[in-house]
Image (cartoon, helix red, strand yellow):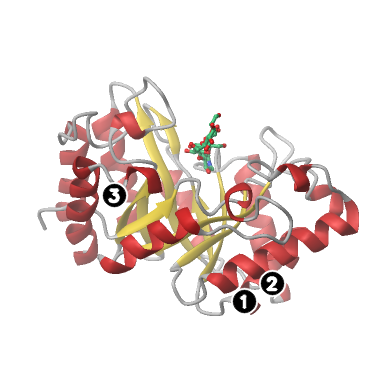
Amino acid sequence: GTTLGASAAERGRYFGAAIAAFKLSDSTYVGILNREFNSVTPENEMKWDATEPSQGSFSYGNADRIVNHAQANGMRIRGHALLWHAQQPGWAQNMSGSALRSAAINHVTQVATKYRGKIHSWDVVNEAFADGSGGGRRDSNLQRTGNDWIEAAFRAARAADPNAKLCYNDYNTDGINAKSTGIYNMVQDFKSRGVPIDCVGFQSHLSNSVPSDYQANLQRFANLGVDVQITELDISGSNQAAVYATVTNACLAVSRCNGITVWGIRDSDSWRTGQNPLLFDSSGNKKAAYTSTLNALNNG
Ligand code: G3I
């Protein structure tokens, strides 16, 4: 293939980008998006603060802009993210206990129902595990509603949109470490008890290197019977092109790795200001990392 999306498709995978609704009027941006990518993730537009700014009052304008663009151009959509400790609306930040639990599950039901049948994969729960050596949950208002909040969210999402793949998504889980093992244990438990989970997202915000056991980590999750996806890839540093190829090859080597999403299109679109971690420069030109990624998709 001659584009990321076409080359990934030849390998039975998608190649996506996180996009912002307000950039869909930028012709350079849309030109690259439509040429190269066959999947999109709304970078902010489906988050809780964006979709339910006041309780029970839903706001889908920007999310719909992205969904409509994706559907018109034959792109898959990764929904991101139904529940997360960050980017909650103020009203939810001020809630706790059973009131928060009810509000959170209602949020999952409403948003997943709104987009039923349109979402390839949903990040049902994002970043619920703590960093460091403990391997446990992150403290948050959601966690304080009870340890079963994650499975309650997955059950509600399944009921609302039975055909979407339901993912758990996190960062600093790219190698085999205490955090990724905590998630591994949760997925194993969910599978054993019939809690609906279909996939695990590995954000892969990387700095110049990738853990040597990156592929092995993807594979151990796949061996539990879930798909794996690389969901927010960006890589800083002088070794960037080689690391992009390594990550791409790891996904290709794991049959249950569905695809790769980069977290933005041009360096100027990245949340990592000044780090130039993406595949296109700020003018929209292909970088060495683009070429190494494309070559890996075609030859890896
Ligand atoms: O839209 C408001 C605008 O109205 C306001 O005036 C302005 C002033 O701060 O903020 C705007 O919101 C910003 C939003 O992006 C939309 O542009 C927020 O401040 C800003 O914090 C927010 O950043 C996003 C960040 O998540 C929030 O935590 C980034 O764009 C987004 O790339 C980033 O994405 C996350 C993933 O969702 C989860 N994994 C990590 C990843 C990187 O942090």
* Ligand 1 under 8 Å from disc 1 Cβ: no
- Secondary structure at badge 3 equals helix
At x 65%, y 55%, the residue is 52
Q: Which of the two discs, 3 and 2, labels the residue nearer the N terminus?
A: 2
Q: Residue 144 carries which label?
A: none
Residue at mark 1: 160
Residue at mark 2: 156
Q: Which amino acid does label 1 sit on?
A: Ala
CA gap, disc 3 and disc 2 = 35 Å
Q: What residue type is labelled 2?
A: Ala
User: Which quadrant does the N terminus fall into?
Assistant: bottom left
Q: Which amino acid does label 3 sit on?
A: Asn
Residue at the far right in the pictured view: 97
At x 68%, y 62%, the residue is 107
Q: Where is residue 273 in the image (x, y as percent from the top left)?
A: 41, 23
* Ligand 1 under 8 Å from disc 3 Cβ: no
Q: In which quarter of the image is residue 40?
A: bottom left
Q: Position of residue 177 (x, y in %)?
A: 60, 40
Dot 3: within a 10 Å radius of its alpha carbon, few (fewer than 14), some, or many (20 or more) residues? some
Q: In this view, does 57 lie above or below 47?
A: below
Dot 1: within a 10 Å radius of its alpha carbon, few (fewer than 14), some, or many (20 or more) residues? many
Residue 20 in view in this figure: no
Query: CB of mark 2 within 8 Å of CB of mark 1?
Result: yes
Residue 265 located left or right of residue 95: left
- The residue closer to the viewer here, 137 or 20, is 20
- The residue closer to the viewer here, 174 or 101, is 101
- Secondary structure at badge 1 equals helix
At x 78%, y 40%, the residue is 139
- Secondary structure at badge 2 equals helix
Residue at mark 3: 249
CA gap, disc 2 and disc 1 = 6 Å
